[in-house]
Amino acid sequence: MRKNKTLKITVVLLLLILALALALRLVNVGHLVSWDEAWNVNSIQDAASGHHSNATTFYPNFFRHPPLYTGLGVIYSKVAGMSRTGLSYFLEIVSILFSLALIVTLFLCGRDWFNEWAGLGAAFIFAVMPAARVYDSLVKQESMTLFLGLLFLLFFFRKRYVVAGLFLGLALLTKEIIIFVPAAVFLFVLLTRKWDRLKGFGLSLLIAVPMSAWWYLFLSRTEGQFMEFFLGTHSSAQVWHKPFWSYLARIPGDIGWGGLVALLLGLGALAWHLKTFHGADRDREYYLPRDMALFLLIWVLVIYLVLSASYGKPPWMVYTALPAFALLGGWGLAETYRALSNRHGTAVVTVVLLVVLIAATAIPFGFTNYESHGDVLYNSALRDRAVARYINENGGRGARVMLKTGDLSPIMMFYLDSYASGDIALLPAEPARDRVGGDKRVLLIDDSATPAQAARHVAAVKPSFVVLRSNSDAAAAFSSLVKPYDVNGSLIFNGKELLNALLPLLGQK
């Protein structure tokens, strides 16, 4: 009878946590899309519509990461034929649904490895965690990848190695970041010297690697870019270069100060259990809660040591560690209650106050606050959206936009009403007098084009708008003729006004 009552309470609390998690993530739907999100949506639409040119589409990005998540977008786009905004909303909701499934799996892991209360604590911490709420709402693979990765862990520690391998294979077909999880498992099994588990791990790999190898060997187009990013030789690594300690400094903002307190309680409990460990139970077949807490610590250390050494440090890379933080924090709450259990009232009040602290220090730190503090491209995203909205308001769906190749932004294209898949044209190096680019709405000139060449392009193409960065020679030359609309360094020239000013200089009427 008591067991049934406990089960009912557990189910009710888990449902309340899921409802809270859903509410905190749904408010982010329709957010300002980031560079990667816009690139994902644009490449999915290119793939679904059959526009596969490497030079004039976003399609190559479709092969930057494995296809399970983006493949869902392609199927939806083919069936529903949605706009970019509609596709983005769909994929944001898909990400949120996977995050809810991830929270359930997080609870199951916590229950298996510790107890129901630790599982509920982990689920709650992850539900309100600022970083989790943001990344679970993005048009990115993170929540789906970690859901599948946690299923791998759940079944691996249940000794269901074949099922674990299947889920690891699916996770590897979703995003590469999952590699940290099996790496942590391997190190943990070696450290605890349970060789039957090592054989089971080998069996899981024997299933997972062939499941995913075809993608990495034959279709992936990253071509060593991850290592280049790590070493700093890739151009994008310069954008995200930060000091060694920057990921560590972000932990309070990622998990909330209350979450950090719970994490420290979990680490304190682990230290206490390790202090009282004398090795007498080393040969047992099963893992104790202390062992699983040690695994979680190894999981976190693997991620932070590797990523802290990386030259480029985008904030979302540490998402893989968030479930480990939540589980350690959940165990910390459960162990705090157990340590005070002789004084039931004190134990309950203490845990309730900790839960309130976790919520109070996490929930107010919303999407915009988190992104503006962590994404170095956030201001660029605001600018590109503003540029697109200005063109939409003043040119409508028929607007033709000319810009330099290096200034092509997936965010601007995402918000630009006149752009559709396959609607980008590369202009020839030497401008022609007749109309070029056909009916394409986005016209790209080479970054090396001189102001004189850019002027001849304007005369030949007759764009509705010319968008140039303020630090370009062409922008300076055109600004002396026509006053542009300045959006944080992006200058928008009215095409008709600019053309009228240029024709006399070009000797044309």
Image (spheres, rainbow, N blue to C red):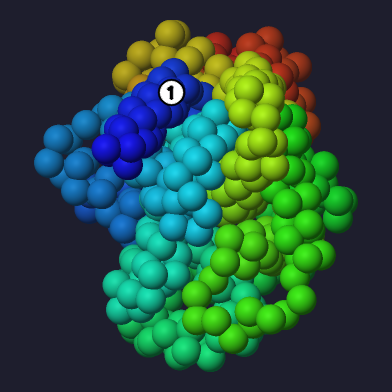
Question: Residue 394: in sight, yes or no?
Answer: yes
Dot 1: few (<14), some (14–19), or many (≥20) neighbours within 10 Å? some
Q: Nearer the viewer, residue 238 or 419?
A: 238
Q: Closest to the observer: 400 or 298? A: 298
**Left or right of 376 in this view: 333:** left
According to the image, label 1 marks what residue? 20
Give above or below for 289 relative to 482.
below
Give, as a three-letter code, the residue at label 1: Leu
Q: Name the residue located 39 percent from the left edge and 81 percent from the top edge.
A: 204
Q: How many marks?
A: 1
Q: Position of residue 473 (x, y in %)?
A: 76, 34
Q: Picture coordinates of residue 499 (x, y %)?
A: 54, 19
What kind of element bears circle 1?
helix
Place of residue 104 in the rendered image (x, y in percent of width and height, measured from the top left): 37, 44
Res. 173 visible in picture: no
**Residue name at image x 30 percent, y 72 percent:** 163
**Relative to the observer, which residue lies in front, 287 or 250?**
287
Say which quarter of the image contains residue 3: top left
Residue occupying image coordinates x 45% and y 65%? 153
Placement of the N terminus among the 4 image quadrants = top left
Q: Residue at x 73, y 37 (%)?
A: 260
Q: Of 416 and 157, which appears nearest the observer?
A: 157
Percent x, y of residue 88: 35, 33
Q: What is the quadrant of residue 387 in the picture? A: top right
Please give left or right for residue 469 compared with residue 91 in the image.
right
| Name of the residue lying farthest toward the left | 79
